[in-house]
Image (spheres, helix red, strand yellow):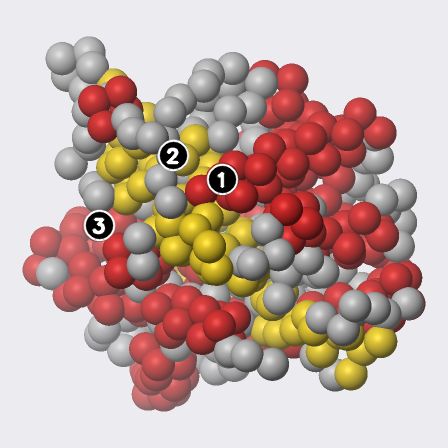
């Protein structure tokens, strides 16, 4: 249920033993039917994973509330202490859209798009990181655990340690951490490394990312390193380790098992004209996700005649994101054109080969889509993890369905029984999709069983527990 406007629950700055610091608060503003504004918890695994830890530890969550040029007091929502950090419209442009999403994001994703370097953006990034660190310093109780999230806040650990050496500070990077050759392009590379070194534990999705970080620290900062340990000149130890993020597996399974979900999945298939094969893609509209390559491969399977017109359809859900960043606007036009071309060339009357959807869906609809699909196609050019792949597997309570997965998604490390493809190799993707469509049921069930075991044993609460246990461990 949305809670009433923040003022009704506004309170003095809390004092918390467990503090999460993230770019966004885990709530979205909603306007109710009576015109009043309130808050609704945003969907997403991170908040549900951290909620129990927050409740049992007097937790607080620090983050931007999503509206520029507005100051808000701390407030509670569903018993969670939320501490808003204000951002001006110019800061949103320079710190968030600029340095975070047009410098760091492309650079950390293999420079798929060229990163832009602007000194004003960097200055805004420093100023905003300072504001988050100052707020965390006010909110954290003596000896508290503070967990800083993601690439927007890499300077916070050091800033916070300088003012609050009593704290235990963890940092987790949700996106890839690049190899030294790419990271070294950043004019402010040393400051970023030193920012992260303010933490006791720096977590990454994959072992290679942790190794990249340790190597960079040795080369660029000159500190002593031994495997995943870094020793600072004052003797303090920093650990860099992998923690592959996951999903609320049981929650997705439960949704997928509901009769209403099964009915909806059947209805989706029927609306598409009962094709033999439904292929599905679900992504934020982002150039890292490899949407163009994937659709091109599918289009060629149709135009080559490898697939009959009525044999297979592709549902691509692509939620627009970061629409004020130029590269995202260009991508949207490209994909619109590509979908139009594939559908235009199909030359038959009836359901179109590609159903292209921009909407955001509730979890129940996502579960129905995952259950309706025969082949889930997840082909990012680079992805820290990719939760969609894991959600699909969790929803296949029927043991059916095939996953085509890019080697360059973090999830490929765990979901080894997927049909693994190189998204830059269009012929390889065509063969991967065909193999997934043509495999017999027993082969698919064998693969799915192994993948389901992986996501069941490694869910999001196991991820949060292992990070926090490692963070609290004395070294
Ligand atoms: P993202 O790049 O956003 O995350 P991903 O891991 O796939 O990518 O998560 C997307 C989430 O949004 C999924 O939970 C999915 O269900 C949901 N979603 C997508 N489209 C939707 C729609 N139309 N309607 C409703 N929900 C939708 C970043 C990194 C990833 C990393 C995660 C977590 O880029 O590599 O896995 O953080 O660390």
Residue 15 in view in this figure: yes
Is the CB–ligand 1 distance for label 1 below 8 Å? no
Residue 467, percent from left and from top: 48, 70
Mark 3 or mark 2: whose residue is earlier in sequence = 2
Residue at image position (29%, 75%) is: 400
Pointer 3 with pointer 2, Cβ within 8 A: no
Mark 2 or mark 1: whose residue is earlier in sequence = 2
Q: Residue furthest top?
A: 35
The circle drawn on residue 236 is: none
Depth order, front residue of 24/374: 24
Residue at image position (54%, 52%) is: 148
Residue at image position (34%, 51%) is: 59
Depth order, front residue of 429/132: 132
Mark 1 or mark 3: whose residue is earlier in sequence = 1
Residue 389, percent from left and from top: 44, 64
Residue at image position (23%, 73%) is: 397
Above/below status of 211 relative to 141: below
Say what secondary structure mark 2 lies in: loop
Q: Which residue is mark 1?
A: 138
Instruction: Tell me which corner region of the image, top left, top right, bottom left or bottom right, holds residue 10.
Output: top left
Alpha carbon distance from label 3 to label 2: 36 Å
Pointer 2 with pointer 1, Cβ within 8 A: yes
């Amino acid at each position: 249920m949305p809670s009433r406007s923040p003022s009704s629950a506004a309170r003095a700055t809390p004092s918390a033993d467990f503090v999460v610091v993230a770019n966004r608060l885990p709530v979205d503003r909603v306007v109710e039917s009576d015109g009043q504004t309130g808050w609704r918890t945003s969907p997403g695994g991170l908040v549900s994973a951290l909620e129990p830890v927050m409740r049992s530890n007097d937790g607080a969550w620090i983050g931007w509330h999503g509206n520029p040029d507005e100051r808000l007091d701390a407030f509670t929502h569903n018993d969670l202490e939320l501490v808003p950090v204000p951002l001006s419209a110019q800061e949103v442009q320079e710190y968030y859209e600029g340095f975070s999403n047009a410098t760091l994001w492309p650079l950390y994703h293999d420079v798929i798009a060229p990163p832009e370097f602007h000194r004003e953006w960097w200055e805004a990034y420093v100023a905003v990181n300072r504001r988050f660190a100052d707020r965390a310093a006010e909110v954290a109780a003596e000896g508290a655990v503070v967990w800083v999230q993601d690439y927007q806040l890499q300077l916070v650990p050091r800033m916070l340690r300088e003012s609050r050496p009593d704290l235990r500070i963890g940092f987790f990077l949700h996106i890839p951490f690049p190899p030294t050759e790419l990271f070294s392009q950043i004019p402010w590379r040393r400051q970023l490394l030193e920012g992260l070194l303010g933490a006791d534990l720096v977590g990454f999705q994959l072992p290679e990312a942790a190794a990249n970080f340790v190597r960079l620290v040795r080369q660029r900062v000159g500190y002593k390193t031994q495997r995943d340990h870094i020793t600072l000149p004052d003797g303090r130890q920093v650990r860099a380790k992998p923690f592959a993020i996951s999903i609320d597996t049981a929650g997705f399974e439960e949704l997928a098992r509901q009769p209403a979900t099964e009915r909806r999945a059947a209805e989706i298939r029927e609306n598409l004209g009962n094709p033999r094969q439904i292929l599905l893609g679900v992504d934020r509209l982002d150039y890292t996700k490899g949407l163009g390559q994937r659709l091109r491969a599918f289009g060629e399977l149709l135009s080559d005649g490898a697939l009959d017109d009525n044999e297979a359809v592709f549902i691509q859900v692509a939620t627009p994101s970061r629409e004020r960043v130029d590269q995202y606007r260009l991508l949207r036009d490209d994909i619109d054109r590509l979908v139009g071309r594939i559908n235009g060339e199909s030359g038959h009357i009836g359901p179109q080969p590609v159903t292209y959807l921009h909407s955001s869906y509730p979890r129940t609809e996502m579960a129905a889509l995952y259950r309706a699909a025969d082949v889930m196609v997840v082909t990012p050019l680079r992805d820290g993890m990719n939760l969609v792949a894991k959600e699909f597997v969790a929803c296949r309570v029927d043991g059916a369905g095939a996953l085509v997965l890019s080697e360059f998604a973090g999830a490929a490390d765990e979901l080894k029984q997927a049909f693994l493809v190189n998204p830059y190799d269009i012929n390889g993707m065509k063969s991967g999709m065909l193999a997934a469509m043509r495999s017999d049921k027993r082969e698919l069930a064998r693969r799915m069983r192994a993948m389901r075991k992986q996501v069941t044993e490694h869910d999001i609460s196991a991820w949060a527990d292992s990070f926090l246990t490692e963070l609290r461990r004395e070294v």
